[in-house]
Image (cartoon, grey):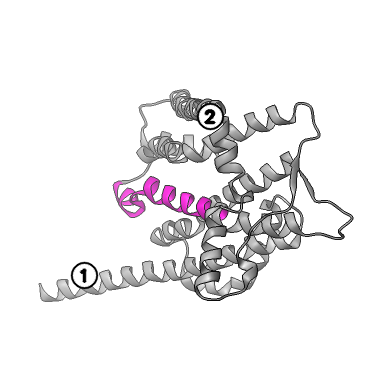
Amino acid sequence: MIKKLLDLRSKGDAEMSFMDHLEELRWHIARSLIAIVIVGVLLFINKSFLFDQIILGPKKPDFLTYRALCYLSNTYNLAPELCIQSIEFQIINRDLSGPFMVHMQLSFIVALVFVFPYILWELWRFVSPALYDQEKRKIGNVVLMSSFMFYLGVLFGYYLVAPFSIQFLGTYQLSTEVANTVDLSSYVDSITGLAFACGLTFQFPLIILFLSRLGFVTPQFLKTYRKYALVGILFLAAIITPSPDMFSQCIVTVPLYILYEISIWVSARVYKSGSDTEIENVQNNSNE
């Protein structure tokens, strides 16, 4: 992948040697890593905010999602089970170095989420000189759109997917004789894994948009291979879900498939817009 980017750069700027491109790429990567480290250190210092407010938030009954469900239940006389009063499971740690390692790992994972737009911007700065002006215009504000879709996916995973997973899996009880205790690393991996995975998968419509504008993907192609895409989505959901259970996989599979259908609509809009532009150009030429 890196070699391909370097080759593209070489084509875009013949005056720079391969080693010059490699050196420039190294500095782009270095600046991205420095940004992650700085934000990670700040998050590590603010331990209470990181854990009590962000990570442990979906475990508390006053979490935004649970309060919204309770409001809907009380307002519209829905099922009283929607109003969650408590989540009966305990988070434990069984490893001596567990809290410190989880704290450090989590700080840099959350930092990666915060600096994601900056990393995209650094990547765009490196790749864009290899593109023609026409290609740049077609791609447009790639950093802004990609960042928006990423954060939309993270919020979807954090406020919808993660709470329902915690509520179902954390309170699922085989017997009253069996207490539910969840390992700290398992809980943290579930929260961060679901949120981050949703952020990445929400990039799919944007990828289809770019490929459609460049002429590599058509809506007919996406419709033809819909059934194969469903199999691929199931396989992808099995990979990105932190827990190997069918419930978590279904929670991830449903939005993935919805995103695929949205991608078909996006591709169709791109081609319709292109057809309208061609018709308008033909009419203008005829008038001339």
Which segment is the magenta one? 133-157
Q: Which quarter shows the C terminus?
A: bottom left
- Within 10 Å of the Cα at label 2, are there few (<14), some (14-19), or many (20+) other Cα atoms? few
Residue 132 in percent (x, y) is at: 33, 46
Q: Is residue 219 visible?
A: yes
At 38% across and 60% down in the image, what residue appears?
A: 213
Q: As rendered, which of 163 and 133 lies closer to the eye? A: 163
Foreground mark, 1 or 2?
2
| Disc ID at residue 237 | none
User: Residue lying farthest right?
Assistant: 177
- Amino acid on which disc 2 is placed: Asn
In the rendered view, tell whether residue 184 sits above or below residue 135: above
Q: Quadrant of residue 280?
A: bottom left
Q: Which residue is mark 2?
A: 46
- Amino acid on which disc 1 is placed: Asn
Q: Which residue is mark 1?
A: 281
Q: As rendered, which of 27 and 147 lies closer to the eye? A: 147
Q: Is residue 236 visible?
A: no
Q: Find the distance from the CA under tag 1 to the CA under tag 2.
A: 58 Å
Q: Which quarter shows the N terminus?
A: top right
